Amino acid sequence: MFKVAMGLMSVGALFAAAPAIAHGMEIGNDLERCSADAKGPAVLVDVRGFAASTGKVRVQSYPATRAAWLAKGEWLGRIDVPVKAVGGQMRFCMPVPQPGRYGIAVRHDRDGNGKTDFSRDGGGFSNNPSINIFNLGKPGVEKAAFYAGPGVTKITINLKYM
C-alpha cells in the first residue's frame, strides 16, 4: 500500500511540474514549447509590422465562442513582454488546452503605459481580419477563429495602427 501511495505521489509531482494551460493563465514566451520536437497543442504566432521597438506587447488566446471572444477575463493564456522586434517582427508560442477552435489577439502598447491609445498603439488578430473605427478594432469571432490541431499550429498576425 505504501509503495502504491508513493507511486501516485510521484505521478502527481510529475504532472505538477508540467502545468496545463488553464483559464486566465499568464505564461512566459517559451519558444521551446513550439519547437520541432514539441508535442502541442500550441500555436506558433509570428507577429509582423511593429511600428516601433518600444513598449510592451500582449498576446492573448481565447476560446472561439461569441461569449468568450475578447470578453474581459475570458482569455485562456496571456504573454505580456517588452517589445524586442527584429525587423519589425516577434515570435510567440501560445500553448492551448486541447485541439480546437481559438482566436488570438495581439496589442502593441507603444509607450508601455498599460492603456490603449488608439492614435498610437497597434493591434492584430488571428486570420488578420480588417479592423476599423466602426467596429472599434474588434472583429467578430467568426472572422478571427482558427483550428489549432494536436501539434504545433503556425499562424501570422499582421499588426495594424489607426
Image: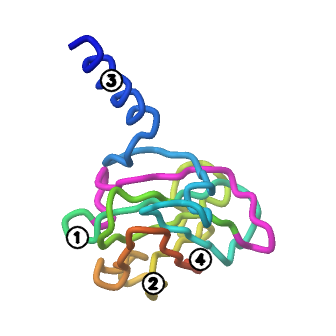
* Residue 160 shown in magenta: no
Secondary structure character of the magenta stretch overall: loop
- The residue type indicated by label 3 comes to Gly
- Badge 4, how many Cα within 10 Å: few under 14, some, many 20+? many
In which quadrant of the rendered view does residue 151 lie? Answer: bottom left
The residue labelled by disc 4 is 159
Q: What residue does disc 1 label?
A: 65
Which quadrant of the rendered structure holds the C terminus? bottom right
Q: Is residue 1 above or below residue 110?
A: above
Residue depicted at 68% across the width and 78% down the height: 49
Q: CA distance from mark 4 to mark 1?
A: 23 Å
Q: Earlier in the sequence, mark 4 or mark 1?
A: 1
- Is 120 on the left-hand or right-hand side of 100? right
- Is the C-beta separation of discs 2 and 3 under 8 Å? no
Query: Does the CB distance between marks 3 and 4 fall below 8 Å?
Result: no
Of helix, strand and loop, which one carries label 4? Answer: loop
Task: Read off the residue under disc 3.
Answer: 7
Q: Amino acid at mark 4?
A: Leu
Q: Return the disc, 4 or 2, that comes first in the chain's sequence.
A: 2
